[in-house]
Image (spheres, rainbow, N blue to C red):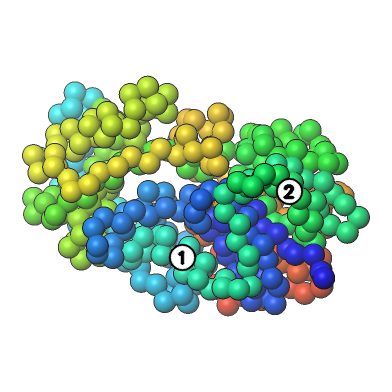
């Protein structure tokens, strides 16, 4: 019996890597520390209708993320442009909102997936079927290089156990890998230090979402887009479905993670609703549902070094794996994408690069995919 190919992390990158390996004729073992698939992709259903609110990443850019566009269309999912018609609201430090006649437009235009980004991860998971064995609630504790593969020390509800793998793809963010996963033989200290300096995309961020019966702001001629110099939300957008029949607003929390932890999620929700009421009127005070998702305190996403949200988009680069590991282990995840790091499309690109490494190492076979090839993004 041949050893399996093991993928650590069942976020978008891990699910896509497993999907590609299945298509190439390989069975895989997909290991996830959380109790669910998706990683940083998380969409919350409000009511019984199909629209879900994205608690993690929400946007992709068709003109800049060709892999995302091709995969979404191949899986039969719908997407639509981010709503941006109407006026912009700007809140000053004194809490006084000012209305600007036109809103801020993203360039190139951003799109959202109908039903939430989780539609994408669920569609990929559905295609894995019997060719992938999924292990949830299972944590990677360490790795040892053996003559015929990699020995993984894993822990689940039943205790610790070992899995010998022919090839391994790791999608764990670099900081978490350096912090939590000891390796024998050890990796060079300079490489470990570099991983500890690599910011985890979105890890320091928190999002606030509120669902409403109607998109009342549109009736006032507002786009739902707003910026604030007071907070706690620094940036707000319309999170409704494509027709506006299922209405919602989302905000990126500008307050620090220490402040968020000190006041707690319920007080943060109260302050966020008070801010929406200042900016959009009394109707904002009474949502059907509201929630805060704070990624800074998710142990499978963030480290202590990730507590401060990124103020810019980092330039990530392709992963480096030292010898003698370089023919057995491959690194994926959006922080490992040389062209689209931090984007959903970067998770796909990094998965393709890792799978191609696995196939060439095991069979001398290049990866074949029907998704659009890499395009360099402007910097």
- Measured from the top left, where is residue 120 in percent x and y? 45, 65
**Is label 1 in contact with label 2 (beta carbons under 8 Å)?**
no
- Measured from the top left, where is residue 111 in percent x and y? 36, 61
Nearest the camera: 187 or 375? 187
Q: Seen in the image, is 367 located left or right of residue 305?
A: right
Q: Nearer the viewer, mark 1 or mark 2?
A: 2
- Of the numbered discs in the image, which one, if any, rests on residue 264? none
Q: Image height check: is 357 above or below 271?
A: below
- The residue lying at 51 percent from left, 50 percent from top is 35
- Measured from the top left, where is residue 102 in percent x and y? 19, 50
Q: Image height check: is 267 above or below 65?
A: above
Q: Image height check: is 100 above or below 96?
A: below
Q: What element carries label 2?
A: strand
- First in sequence, mark 1 or 2: give its number: 1
Badge 1 density bin: few <14, some 14–19, many ≥20, Cα 10 Å: some
Quadrant (top left/top right/bottom left/bottom right) for the N terminus: bottom right
- Measured from the top left, where is residue 29 in percent x and y? 67, 62
| Residue position marked by numbered label 2 in the rendering | 161
- The residue lying at 55 percent from left, 42 percent from top is 300
The quadrant holding residue 173 is: top right
- Can residue 133 be seen in this snapshot? yes
- The residue lying at 29 percent from left, 35 percent from top is 233
| Residue position marked by numbered label 1 in the rendering | 122
- Can residue 350 be seen in this snapshot? no
- The residue lying at 24 percent from left, 64 percent from top is 49
Badge 2 density bin: few <14, some 14–19, many ≥20, Cα 10 Å: few
Nearest the camera: 353 or 207? 207
């Amino acid at each position: 019996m041949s050893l399996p190919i093991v993928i650590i992390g069942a976020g978008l990158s891990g699910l896509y890597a497993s999907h590609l390996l299945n298509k190439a004729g390989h069975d895989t073992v997909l290991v996830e520390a959380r109790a669910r698939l998706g990683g940083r992709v998380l969409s919350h259903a409000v009511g019984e209708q199909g629209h879900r609110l994205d608690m993690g990443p929400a946007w992709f850019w068709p003109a800049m993320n060709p892999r995302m566009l091709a995969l979404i269309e191949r899986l039969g999912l719908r997407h639509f442009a981010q709503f941006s018609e109407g006026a912009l609201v700007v809140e000053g430090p004194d809490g006084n909102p000012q209305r600007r006649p036109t809103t801020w437009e993203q360039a190139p235009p951003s799109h959202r997936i109908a039903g939430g980004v989780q539609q994408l991860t669920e569609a990929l998971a559905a295609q894995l079927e019997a060719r992938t064995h999924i292990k949830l609630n299972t944590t990677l504790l360490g790795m040892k290089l053996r003559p015929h593969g990699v020995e993984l020390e894993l822990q689940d509800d039943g205790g610790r156990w070992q899995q010998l793998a022919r090839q391994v793809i790791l999608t764990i963010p670099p900081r978490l890998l350096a912090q939590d996963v000891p390796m024998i033989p050890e990796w060079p200290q300079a490489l470990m230090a570099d991983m500890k300096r690599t910011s985890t995309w979105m890890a320091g961020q928190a999002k606030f979402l509120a669902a409403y019966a109607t998109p009342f702001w549109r009736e006032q001629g507002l786009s739902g887009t707003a910026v604030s110099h007071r907070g706690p939300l620094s940036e707000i957008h319309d999170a409704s479905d494509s027709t506006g029949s299922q209405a919602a607003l989302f905000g990126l929390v500008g307050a620090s993670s220490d402040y968020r932890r000190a006041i707690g999620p319920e007080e943060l929700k109260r302050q966020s609703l008070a801010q929406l009421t200042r900016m959009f009127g009394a109707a904002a005070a009474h949502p059907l549902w509201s929630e805060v998702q704070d990624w800074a305190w998710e142990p499978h996403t963030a480290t202590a070094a990730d507590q401060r949200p990124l103020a810019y988009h980092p330039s990530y680069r392709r992963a480096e794996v030292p010898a003698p590991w370089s023919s057995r282990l491959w690194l994926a995840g959006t922080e490992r994408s040389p062209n689209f790091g931090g984007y959903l499309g970067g998770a796909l690109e990094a998965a393709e690069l890792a799978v191609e490494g696995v196939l060439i190492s095991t069979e001398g076979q290049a990866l074949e995919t029907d998704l659009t090839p890499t395009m360099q993004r402007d910097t």
